[in-house]
Amino acid sequence: MKRVYTKRKIDGGILVSWREVGSRWKARLSQMDWYLCFGLTFLFFVVMGLSIAAWKLNLILHDADALPIEAVAVKGERIHTSDKEIRTALQDLMQRSFFSADVNQVQEALEALPWVYQASVRREWPAKLKVYLVEQHAVAHWNGDAWLNDLGEVFDAPQKEDIGPLPRLAGPEAESQIVLTTYRQVSELLKINGFDLEGLSLSPRHAWHGVLDSGIMLELGREDKMARIQRFINVYPTLIKQEKEVAKVDLRYDTGLAVGWVNAQKRASK
């Protein structure tokens, strides 16, 4: 049989048969398959090893016994929020590990306390949570059993005997900021003229009603509040010259006013 040679010269000019070329390529492909198999096998075990390591690390990070939260450091001026209230609020969350504890949930739990206005929480390695609290600053009673803070926001919290006397404000819930702002304006005008405004309320029909610390009630109506307060201030020296005690002053008139006297009020109540 006649042997067929390639027309390509390799290996220093020696002619090689197609069969030999095929054998060489087969050998090379065989070697490549082994390298590929080895590489894929190695990659598989690397991925498996990393997955197992990540799984074990995750177990450790979420194991409260392995990485417990050992302390909570609380800063910020606190008057009405006790350590006991904070411990109770965080009792369930403290059962988690340092890494699995959700600082947002801790923040929400603290801000749910009645006298806490704002809380910020962060982790501190290796086992501490640092908390900064800002308490509500009550500036007035609101609708009898709630409070207003210095921003005019309503909040519910237990009554505290250690809080000094505060004005009593009332009105629709959505009008709390307007009521507080108006109280401050009216109170300032009265104070520089020797009067103390004890309470101010806004009716559903937006009529204003004030009470002085002396017990005198002021009906201010819906308009020109400041002008009517000034009218009361101007006429009050004349009123106290009377032998009667003032109980109520109705200022809902364009130019004048109506006065209710204590004796007349008592007779009317009978």
Image (tube, grey):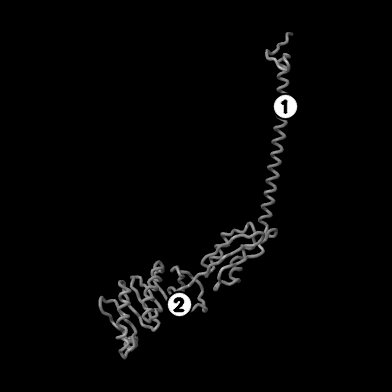
Seen as rendered, the residue at the extreme top is 2
Question: Local crowd at mark 2 within 10 Å, few (<14), some, or many (≥20)?
Answer: few
- Specify the amino acid type for callout 2: Leu
Q: In which quarter of the image is residue 124?
A: bottom right
Say left or right for 178 vs 69: left
- Chain-order first, disc 1 or disc 2: 1
Of circles 1 and 2, which is in front?
Answer: 2
Question: Local crowd at mark 1 within 10 Å, few (<14), some, or many (≥20)?
Answer: few
Q: Mark 1 points at which residue?
A: 30
| Residues at marks 1 and 2, CA–CA distance in whole angstroms | 92 Å
- Residue lying at 63% horizontally and 57% vertically, measured from the top left: 100
Depth check, front residue: 17 or 94 = 17
- Residue lying at 69% horizontally and 36% vertically, measured from the top left: 40
Tell me residue 252's x, y (percent): 29, 76
Q: In which quarter of the image is residue 10?
A: top right
**In the figure, 102 relative to 168: above or below?**
above
Q: Name the residue under label 2.
A: 166
Tell me residue 33's x, y (percent): 71, 29
**In the figure, 118 relative to 79: above or below?**
above
Seen as rendered, the residue at the extreme bottom is 243
